[in-house]
Amino acid sequence: MRIHIQGGRVLDPANDVDAQRDVYIADGRILAVGDAPKGFNSDRVINARGHIVCPGLIDMQARLREPGNEHKGTILSETRAAAAAGITSLCCPPDTLPVVDTPAVAELIYERALTAGYAKVLTLGALTKGLEGTLIAEMKALLDVGCVGVSNAWRPITNTLVMRRAMEYAATFDLPVFLHAEDPYLHAGGCAHEGAISTRLGLGGIPEIAETIAVARDLALVEETGARAHFCQLSTARGMDMVLAAQARGLPVTADVSIHHLHLTEMDIGDYNALCHVRPPLRTQRDRDGLRRAILRGVAVCSAHQPHEPDAKAGPYAETEPGIAGLESLLPLTLRLVDDGVCTLLEALASLTVRPARILGVSSGSLSVGADADVCIFDPQREWRLADQDQMLSHGRNTPFFHWDLRGQVTHTLLNGRVVYTATAQPA
């Protein structure tokens, strides 16, 4: 289909574009931005006046729950929710059931995402077999079937020699290693940030150094092995500063932060609000402010999407499962950073498009001529409220952002030049 997106404000951080321009799409790719190509005849015109046209969003960290936990979500349900949120690519960690440590599991995920047709799913392969932290996985085989990196997810590799050998092996293929920095002994089964709030509530605390010690170890190994490393969902200002300082010294490291850590703090736990039970835990306001400053230094933002069934959040706080269903609030909460004066609109969108694209090594994340026509169109002024769980398309309704006043609503999402989402009704 040949599509003409007309009259929108084009924001393309990859090309530093912020201007009112038309976008022309043909054969699933961006044909032109600005003037119409000679002889172009459109099959469909999308009126984007008063709207922003940007590259489709790329979510660095989203658990789709399939295979293995389909009662929480499926590739179909979660990619459909992603399309409604303007997300055209999602990066799936390897802690599925079975684990993504063989080409067969990775290919299964790709095939089901292709069949669903709502978004591209980029898979991380396992760093160690079964995520058990003892034997290195067959990374080359995983790379050959399209895995964009390797990770042990939240399963710690306590044997430093194994981690060193795994990084060395990954470095031979220039395969990025995705790290969740958390010392398991300092974590010690905690469920909240170690501080006054956890003490008052009688909850097991996870100290700041559970993250910073793990960051220090892994940075030393990166320097030793030369592996490219990406630190996922950093939660402390100190941990983030350590990674950015290493980056400034020339180490091949990057980082992302989950959107809920940019808005919530330990105070939001309130009286045991299990919807705020996340891993890593919500930290202090100082940490939140430090993470916000990192947006200006090239950090990516992710949803850290983890859909759960209602029972997973129904017990006592410490016994509930951590995680937030974050796909559908990712864009408006990122736009809220602009309203809060944290960054410009172009910087906010960069954290969701070109930055993750570069980290993942994919060609998405821009509106360059010839690029895949993955496009998000949204109304930046549309105010809405996630007031009812039935509004959510994700199977997981576990979000603490119910009844927040949000601004910015997706009206169209295009994947490879095909319209996969059109807003038919506006939430009240």
Image (cartoon, grey):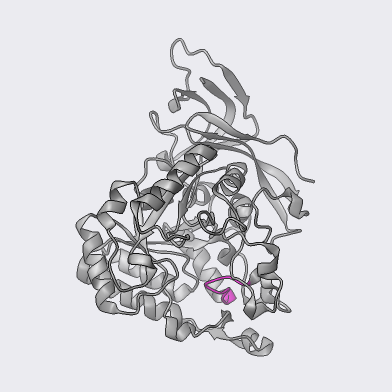
Query: Where residue 171 sits: x, y (%)?
Result: 23, 60
Image position of 144 with respect to 93: above or below = above
Relative side of 82 to 384, left or right: left
The picture quadrant where one finds residue 288 is bottom right
Magenta segment range? 277-285
Q: Tell me what residue is drawn at x 41 percent, y 42 percent.
A: 14
Residue furthest to the top: 39
Q: Main secondary structure of the magenta part?
A: loop
The answer to whether residue 54 is visible is: no
The answer to whether residue 381 is visible is: yes
Question: Is 283 inside the magenta-drawn segment?
Answer: yes
Disc tally is 0
Q: Tell me what residue is drawn at x 34 percent, y 73 percent.
A: 133
Image position of 144 with respect to 278: above or below = above
Relative side of 54 to 400, left or right: left
Give the camera-side residue of 299 and 227.
Answer: 227
Query: Where residue 369 sits: x, y (%)?
Result: 39, 29
Question: Is 34 inside the magenta-drawn segment?
Answer: no
Give the camera-side residue of 343 and 301.
Answer: 301
Q: Tell me what residue is drawn at x 51 percent, y 56 percent.
A: 62
Relative side of 379 to 186, left or right: right
Residue furthest to the right: 428
